[in-house]
C-alpha cells in the first residue's frame, strides 16, 4: 500500500507539471506571450468572480508560485483590475478586466477541446469521475491529517 500511495503522490506532482507545460504550449499557440502559464491559470480560476487575494490563495491551485508576484504581473499587463474593498480598506478585491475575460474565454475553449479529445478514446467520463473521487478522498485524508497534527499512532502502523 505504501508504494502505491507514494506513486500516486508522485504522479499527481508530475501531472501538475505536465499540465503547466500544456498550458504553456497552448498560450504560445494562442499568441499570448505577455504572461506565463501559472499566471494564465490564476486568471482562468478567477473567471467572472470578484474576490480577495486571500480567497484566491486558499483555493490552492498555485503550487510553488508566488501569488502576489503573479497578480502584480497580471495587473501590469492589464488582465486584472484591483480595488480596495469599500467595507474593509485593508482588503483588496480583484477581478478580470475585459482583456482578462477575453483570454479566459479563449482558454475555456482550449480546455473544452482537451476534454472533448480526452473523451474520444483515451478516457471515458466515468473513469475521469472515478479518478476525481479518489483524489478527493486523498485530499480529505490529508486535510484531516493536517488538522489533527498527523496520523494517530494507532493507525500509523
Image (cartoon, helix red, strand yellow):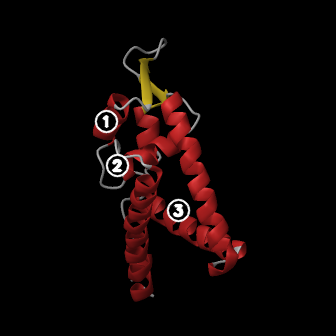
Instruction: Measure the alpha-carbon separation of dots 1 and 3.
Output: 33 Å
Please say if 102 is above or below 87: below
Residue drawn at the location 48% of the way across and 11% of the way down: 86
Residue farthest toward the top in the current orientation of the protein: 86
Residue drawn at the location 29% of the way across and 44% of the way down: 66
x, y (%) of residue 90? Answer: 36, 18
Q: Mark 3 = which residue?
A: 140
* Residue 11 shows in this picture: yes
Numbered-mark total: 3
Q: Mark 1 = which residue?
A: 73
Question: Dot 2: few (<14), some (14–19), or many (≥20) neighbours within 10 Å?
Answer: some
The disc, 1 or 3, on the residue closer to the chain's N-terminal end is 1
Give the number of the disc on residue 55: none
x, y (%) of residue 100? Answer: 49, 35
Instruction: Measure the alpha-carbon separation of dots 1 and 2.
Output: 9 Å
Q: Mark 2 = which residue?
A: 36
Question: Dot 3: few (<14), some (14–19), or many (≥20) neighbours within 10 Å?
Answer: few
The disc, 1 or 2, on the residue closer to the chain's N-terminal end is 2
Contact (Cβ within 8 Å) of mark 1 with mark 2: yes
x, y (%) of residue 120? Answer: 69, 75
Left or right of 69 in this view: 22: right
Question: Dot 1: few (<14), some (14–19), or many (≥20) neighbours within 10 Å?
Answer: some
| Closer to the camera in the image, 9 or 150 | 9
Q: Which of marks 1 and 3 is in front?
A: 1
Kind of element beneath mark 3: helix
Please say if 12 is above or below 143: below
Kind of element beneath mark 2: loop
* Residue 154 shows in this picture: no
x, y (%) of residue 48? Answer: 59, 34
Quarter holding the N terminus is: bottom left
Amino acid at each position: 500500500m505504501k508504494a502505491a500511495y507514494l506513486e500516486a503522490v508522485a504522479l499527481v506532482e508530475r501531472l501538475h507539471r505536465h499540465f503547466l507545460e500544456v498550458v504553456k504550449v497552448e498560450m504560445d499557440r494562442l499568441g499570448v506571450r505577455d504572461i506565463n502559464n501559472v499566471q494564465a491559470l490564476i486568471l482562468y480560476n478567477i473567471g467572472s468572480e470578484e474576490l480577495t487575494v486571500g480567497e484566491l490563495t486558499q483555493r490552492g491551485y498555485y503550487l510553488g508560485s508566488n501569488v502576489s508576484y503573479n497578480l502584480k504581473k497580471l495587473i501590469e499587463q492589464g488582465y486584472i483590475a484591483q480595488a480596495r474593498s469599500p467595507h474593509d480598506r485593508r482588503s483588496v478585491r480583484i477581478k478580470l478586466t475585459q482583456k482578462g475575460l477575453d483570454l479566459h474565454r479563449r482558454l475555456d475553449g482550449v480546455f473544452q477541446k482537451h476534454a472533448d479529445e480526452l473523451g474520444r478514446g483515451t478516457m471515458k467520463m466515468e473513469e475521469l469521475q472515478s479518478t476525481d473521487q479518489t483524489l478527493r478522498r486523498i485530499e480529505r485524508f490529508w486535510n484531516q491529517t493536517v488538522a489533527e497534527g498527523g496520523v494517530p499512532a494507532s493507525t500509523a502502523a
